[in-house]
Image (cartoon, rainbow, N blue to C red):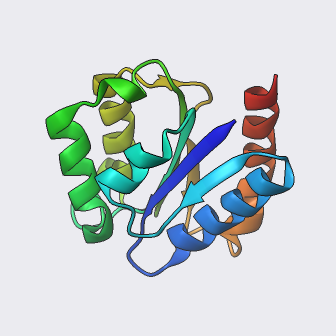
């Protein structure tokens, strides 16, 4: 199975989590595409069979600048090739920002709904105010996603 991982990061933590996901998927035998600044053409050119988004939240619950272009093109074009694919989201944030906590992840979940991507597992919320190593904290969730996609 071909899995495309895309990320949006402010300080690099989401990229670190995405790289861990890439490594785990490859170790499980998946073909993986990951680029921290993936373009629309690269993503669609890979012809993914599943999607994983890893994004932090910035501003007032918004996506990081590094993900804005890809998000905009996906939302504007709604490519039929992604309709019906399994997808999952890891949202990073700080719970002390109540109303906007993991807002970037919620934006991707809304995009998935518009694209017709089936969210196969509840969004993982990684709270910067509670965790020291978000890569390690994401691993059990990622292993469950891998098992689901293999099943």
Q: Residue furthest bottom?
A: 11
Image quarter of the N terminus: top right
Determine if residue 78 is in view: yes
Which residue is rendered at x = 41% and y = 29% of the image? 82
| Quadrant (top left/top right/bottom left/bottom right) for the C terminus | top right
* Residue at figure coordinates x 18%, y 49% from the top left: 72
Where is residue 25? Give x, y as percent: 75, 51
Residue 111 appears left or right of 7: left
Coordinates of residue 58 in the picture (x, y in percent): 30, 66
Q: Of residues 106 and 69, which is closer to you in this image? A: 69
User: For this rendering, which residue is in front, 149 or 2?
Assistant: 2
**Relative height, residue 77 to residue 65 (above, below):** above
Pick out the residue farthest to the left: 76
Query: In the rendered view, does 35 fall on the left or right side of 31?
Result: left
The location of residue 10, given as percent across then percent down, is 38, 76
Which quadrant of the structure image shows residue 112? top left
Outermost residue, front direction?
Answer: 45
**Residue drawn at (85%, 47%), measured in percent from left and top?**
28
Q: Is residue 44 left or right of residue 70?
A: right
Check the image and report above or below for 120 versus 135: above
Number of numbered discs on residues: 0
Answer above or below: position of 47 versus 22.
above
Left or right of 20 on screen, residue 80: left
Q: Is residue 130 visible?
A: no
Identify the residue at image location x=75%, y=45%: 30
Q: Nearer the viewer, residue 108 or 73?
A: 73
* Residue 56 position in % (x across, y down): 42, 63
């Amino acid at each position: 199975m071909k899995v495309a991982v895309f990320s949006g990061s402010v300080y690099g933590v989401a990229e670190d989590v995405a790289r861990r996901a890439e490594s785990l998927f490859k170790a499980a035998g998946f073909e993986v595409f990951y680029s921290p600044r993936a373009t629309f053409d690269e993503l669609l050119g890979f012809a993914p069979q599943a999607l994983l988004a890893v994004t932090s939240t910035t501003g007032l619950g918004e996506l990081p600048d590094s993900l804005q272009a890809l998000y905009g093109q996906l939302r504007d074009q709604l490519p039929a090739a992604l309709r019906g694919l399994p997808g999952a989201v890891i949202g990073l944030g700080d719970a002390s920002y109540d109303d906007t906590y993991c807002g970037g992840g919620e934006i991707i979940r809304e995009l998935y709904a518009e694209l017709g991507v089936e969210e196969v597992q509840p969004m993982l919320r990684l709270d910067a105010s509670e965790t020291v190593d978000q890569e390690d904290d994401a691993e059990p969730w990622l292993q469950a996603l891998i098992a689901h996609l293999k099943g």
